[in-house]
Amino acid sequence: MKLSKRLKAISDLIKPNSKVIDVGADHAFLDIYLNLYKKCQCLAIDKSEYSTKTAIDNALKYKADIKAITNDGLKNIKLNDEIIVISGMGTRNIMKILNFDLKNDLILSSHTNIEDLKNFLKNKKYYIYKEVIVEEYKTYDVIYAKRKDDRNG
Ligand SMILES: C[S@@+](CC[C@H](N)C(=O)[O-])C[C@H]1O[C@@H](n2cnc3c(N)ncnc32)[C@H](O)[C@@H]1O
């Protein structure tokens, strides 16, 4: 399967065998690709039941072993060491979803107000570990952010 340039750029940031939670997964193409080609364990979350059904249908079609659920963001999701991906949403929505104390690695691609997103991450003690600019019809910024070690602020 072939991903869009933007989703491929996100997948390139994720190491094989990673655990991934993709919030706003919609069709779950990213998760399917990560499972098939990088053996990642993926949970595809979307608030739309229609998207979840599409994700499940796509997973069956491509014979990928992913989980897909309908949920509002990360509400009631128990987090461990998963990488959280949120892409294809606006900064306000991303900030709402991440508005709690979290430590997981984050891969974010917002289509609005990148500077607001960067300030939000800074206030949450995250630093930008990698940043990739993708040109595909328009310019997309993909940010890989990690939580600073609490010991050295
Ligand atoms: C434009 S799609 C992005 C799909 C894919 N992540 C990508 O980057 O191509 C945005 C998706 O986010 C979902 N979404 C928006 N807010 C959400 C929330 N709070 N929790 C879960 N899903 C959400 C929408 O239902 C929609 O399917």
Image (cartoon, rainbow, N blue to C red):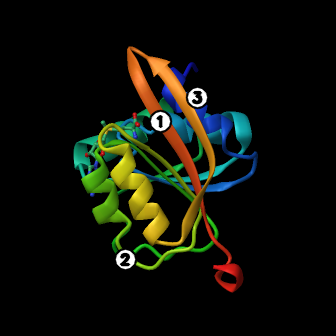
Residue with the mark numbered 3:
8
Left or right of 95 on screen, residue 101: right
Kindly report which numbered mark, 1 or 3, lies closer to the viewer in this rendering.
1
Structural crowding at the residue carrying mark 1, measured as other residues with C-alpha within 10 Å and reported as few (<14), some (14–19) or many (≥20):
some
Question: Which residue carries the number 1 mark?
Answer: 141
Secondary structure beneath label 2: loop
Q: Tag on residue 35?
A: none
Q: Dot 2 corresponds to which residue?
A: 76
Give the x, y percent position of residue 86.
Answer: 43, 49
The three-letter code of the residue at mark 2 reads Asn
Asked if residue 110 can be seen in this view, the reply is yes
Q: Earlier in the sequence, mark 1 or mark 2?
A: 2
Q: Secondary structure at mark 1?
A: strand
User: Could you tell me the amino acid type at mark 3?
Assistant: Lys
The mark lying in front, picked from 1 and 2, is: 1
Q: Nearer the viewer, residue 32 or 8?
A: 8
Question: Gap in Å between the C-alphas at discs 3 and 2?
Answer: 29 Å
Number of numbered callouts drawn: 3
Closer to the chain start, of discs 3 and 2, is 3
Left or right: 74, with 129 as reference point: left
Taking the spot 51% from the left edge, 39% from the top edge, the residue there is: 142
Quarter of the image with the N terminus in it: top right
Q: Quadrant of the C terminus?
A: bottom right
Rounded to the nearest angstrom, the CA distance separating label 1 from label 3 is 13 Å
Residue appearing at x 64%, y 82% in the figure: 150
How far is mark 1 from mark 2, CA to CA? 29 Å
Ranked by sequence position, the earlier of labels 1 and 3 is 3
